[in-house]
């Protein structure tokens, strides 16, 4: 009886061990494969829950199917102008083809080493072919024009600010495209590549500061030039308006003087027509007053018409 119980207990124990070694679970975000003697014996298992395999002969290899982050070490790199900068880069990736990934890469350390080699090389090549200003500026950066700020038309002849050849956003895009083409053969989908930080080495900082100062001075001089051009335009319009106002004022002045002279002539004519003798006498007295001053000696004949009202009163 005892040997029979021992056999039953042993069989039960072996069954439990077999069931335990046959069952495995897959969590959300994981991708699992069943391997037998190093060869893949199943499709990619992505459904969370309980799954089965052959006990003792097969094993389970799990992969992280979530988006993962790669961070580079801060590295000193030269730019196109031989300025050395310190660059820190980040990339996000995920496993796109789990079978291809498992066949080409084994272990997290291998993934890290692969990304270090590929991404660091691509970043170094891209920065080595870029100017320093393209590395630190945005691709859509453009100096604001005073004419644009004032919502006015630009000054004639003023040249607009031109964009740089690329900029950091364009540089990151090129790095992403180049690196994505290299890692796709390993079943990896590279989602993005970002340059987190660019710092200058002590030898480069004075050069960068001088370049920034020169650029700001160039922009300031362009603003001043546009301002001077706008000032001359405003002064020209002002002079034109002043000349127009003066011409209009002179025209109106001549019209008023002409109308006044006409009214005076009409009044003189009416007065002369009412009493010509009195009008002649009044005009002669005015002439005497203007012609003979304190230091004036006037010699006329007694029979002169000019002397008629200073004589005996007879004409």
Image: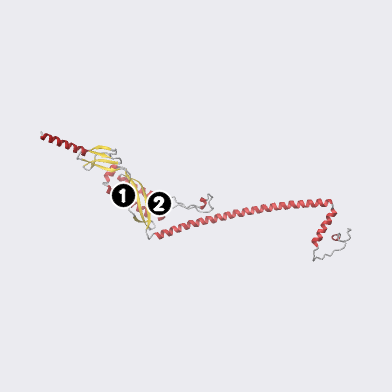
> Residue 156, how many percent across, how many down?
54, 53
> Residue 149, how many percent across, how many down?
51, 51
| Secondary element at tag 1 | helix
Where does label 1 land, which residue? 115
Residue that appears at 82% across and 56% down:
282
Residue that appears at 55% across and 55% down:
229
Task: Tell which of 282 and 185 is nearer to you.
Answer: 282
**Which quadrant would residue 79 be assigned to in this image?**
bottom left
On screen, residue 44 versus residue 82, left or right, reads left
Task: Tell which of 247 and 68 is nearer to you.
Answer: 68
- Counting residues from the start of the chain, the first of labels 1 and 2 encountered is 1
Badge 1: residue crowd in 10 Å (few <14, some 14–19, many ≥20): some
Badge 2: residue crowd in 10 Å (few <14, some 14–19, many ≥20): many
Q: Quadrant of the C terminus?
A: bottom right
| Secondary element at tag 2 | helix
Residue that appears at 46% across and 57% down:
216
> Residue 313, how many percent across, how many down?
88, 59
Q: Which mark is residue 261?
A: none
Position of residue 203 relative to residue 195, above or below, is below
> Residue 109, how many percent across, how many down?
27, 49
Q: Quadrant of the N terminus?
A: top left
Where does label 2 land, which residue? 168
């Amino acid at each position: 009886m005892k040997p029979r119980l021992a056999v039953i207990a042993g069989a039960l124990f072996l069954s439990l061990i077999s069931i335990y070694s046959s069952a495995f679970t897959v969590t959300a975000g994981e991708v699992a494969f069943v391997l037998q003697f190093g060869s893949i014996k199943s499709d990619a298992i992505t459904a969370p829950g309980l799954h089965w395999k052959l006990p003792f002969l097969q094993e389970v290899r799990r992969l992280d199917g979530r988006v993962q982050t790669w961070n580079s070490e801060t590295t000193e790199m030269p730019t196109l102008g031989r300025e050395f900068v310190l660059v820190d880069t980040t990339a996000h990736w995920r496993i796109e083809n789990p079978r291809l990934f498992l066949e080409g890469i084994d272990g997290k350390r291998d993934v890290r080493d692969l990304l270090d080699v590929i991404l660091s090389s691509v970043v170094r090549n891209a920065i080595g072919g870029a100017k320093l200003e393209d590395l630190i500026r945005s691709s859509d950066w453009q100096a604001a024009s005073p004419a644009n700020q004032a919502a006015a038309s630009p000054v004639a002849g003023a040249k607009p600010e031109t964009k740089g050849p690329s900029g950091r956003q364009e540089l990151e895009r090129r790095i992403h495209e180049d690196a994505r083409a290299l890692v796709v053969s390993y079943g990896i989908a590279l989602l993005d590549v970002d340059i987190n930080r660019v710092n200058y080495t002590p030898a480069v900082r004075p050069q960068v500061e001088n370049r920034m100062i020169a650029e700001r001075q160039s922009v300031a001089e362009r603003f001043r030039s546009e301002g001077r051009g706008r000032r001359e335009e405003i002064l020209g319009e002002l002079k034109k308006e002043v000349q127009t106002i003066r011409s209009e004022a002179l025209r109106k002045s001549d019209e008023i003087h002409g109308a006044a002279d006409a009214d005076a002539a009409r009044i003189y004519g009416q007065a002369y027509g009412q009493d010509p003798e009195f009008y002649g006498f009044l005009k002669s007295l005015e002439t005497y007053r203007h012609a003979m001053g304190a230091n004036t000696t006037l010699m006329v004949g007694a029979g002169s018409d000019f002397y008629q009202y200073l004589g005996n009163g007879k004409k």
